[in-house]
Image: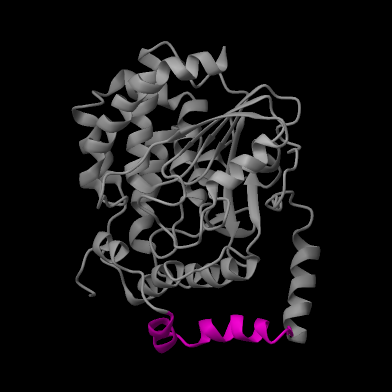
Amino acid sequence: MTQSSRRNFLKTSAISSAAIAGACGMVLDIPSAQAAGAKSSIEIKANEISKKLFSDDGLAIPIATKPTVSKLAKGLDRTMVLGGGGEYYIAWYCGFFHGLYEAGLDMAQIPEMVVGTSAGSYMGSSLLSGEFLRLRTEFDFFGKFPAIFSKMAPIASPNVSQMRADQINMSASDGSIETRRVIGAAALAADNKLNSDRIEKLAALLTGDSKTDWPSSRMHTTGIDCYTGERLVVSQETARKNNIPLAHGAAASSSLPGVAGPTLLGQRFVMDGGICSNPAHVDLVAGSKRALIITLTDGVTGAILTTIPHPIAQNIKDVEATGTKVKWVVAGTPPGVNLLDPKQIEAALHRGYERSKMEASNIKAFWA
């Protein structure tokens, strides 16, 4: 197993609770203690200390569990949400937005607000920083780009700590804050240093000089605090307050447990924003007039990067209940696709491009 590729272990890593217990019984002690109904005095004190110390950074925004108008989206017309899905989905997005641009839709200019998670955080950051326009001008998207991109995709043979983080993530059965904290603890304890160099190069490729500032007030990235399990949202104001550059916000949102990161944002270590039950964080655009929402799956079928249930359809219904008109595009994945395999990049790029030709007229009509 130690000689297998990261791609293979991610593809086959979901294991039973009994196997998890045999490998690291401590993990199962936590929910059983909670089920008993009592938190230890030190846990209660730790929560109080954490809440007091971090209450002023402005990053934590609770995930809405019922239809709620978002303070970030209130009064806006056009908003866009870009969900996650590994290297495959970054490439799909590149092909998709390349095709939309050819069809006369400059998605760097139309939305007043963009929420990006994981792959979507990279794509949104690339669009709004102006870097995507440079990429599509300088590179042959269907020639050199796949080769350049695949060389930067983080690949490494997993070690034991990475396997533990991945297998715990792929054994989750709910998206509670307690579950997120258990996954976050495993993510913090994983040795992912082999991936860090390539992650930085990928961030630089897609976001350009956004390694020192947060240039766009329209861009919002999401993540999960590994320690508290809270949903974090980074916007320009909170980014500058906490000295967070846009490239780091995108990298944190893509820090998949056992693969990459966690990434330090301000004073919080952050993992992938998809590790929750609202994986695209669509609640953040609730209350805007119109929202274009693009996700890899419908939450039921297709490839996954966590076994936390993803009720995306219900998440979107809650947004619509606030009065927001939604156009939902589900990218979809071919059977058996590995979202983290650089060999999939060229095909994903073409699939995204072809899909743009099918959706362009509908999106034009939606924005009109």
Q: Is residue 19 left or right of residue 294?
A: left
Q: Is residue 34 above or below residue 158?
A: below
Q: Is residue 280 above or below residue 208?
A: below
Name the quadrant containing residue 235.
top right
Magenta span of residues: 17-39
User: Percent from the top left, x then y, of residue 232?
Assistant: 64, 51
Question: In this figure, what is the number of numbered marks?
Answer: 0
Dominant secondary structure (helix, strand or loop) of the stretch shown in magenta: helix
Q: Is residue 136 above or below residue 341?
A: above
Q: Is residue 361 left or right of residue 41?
A: left
User: Percent from the top left, x then y, of residue 181?
Assistant: 59, 69
User: Percent from the top left, x then y, of residue 139?
Assistant: 27, 24
The answer to whether residue 235 is visible is: no
Would you say residue 20 sits in the magenta stretch? Answer: yes
The answer to whether residue 364 is visible is: yes
Q: Quadrant of the N terminus?
A: bottom left
Name the quadrant containing residue 145.
top left
Would you say residue 198 sits in the magenta stretch? Answer: no
Choose between 49 and 90: the one closer to the eye.
Answer: 90
Q: Residue at x 48, y 19 (%)?
A: 363
Q: Quadrant of the C terminus?
A: top right
Q: Residue at x 25, y 40 (%)?
A: 345
Q: Is residue 306 above or below residue 128?
A: below
Q: Is residue 267 left or right of residue 313?
A: right
**Scheme of colours in the image:** one colour
User: Percent from the top left, x then y, of residue 171?
Assistant: 44, 71
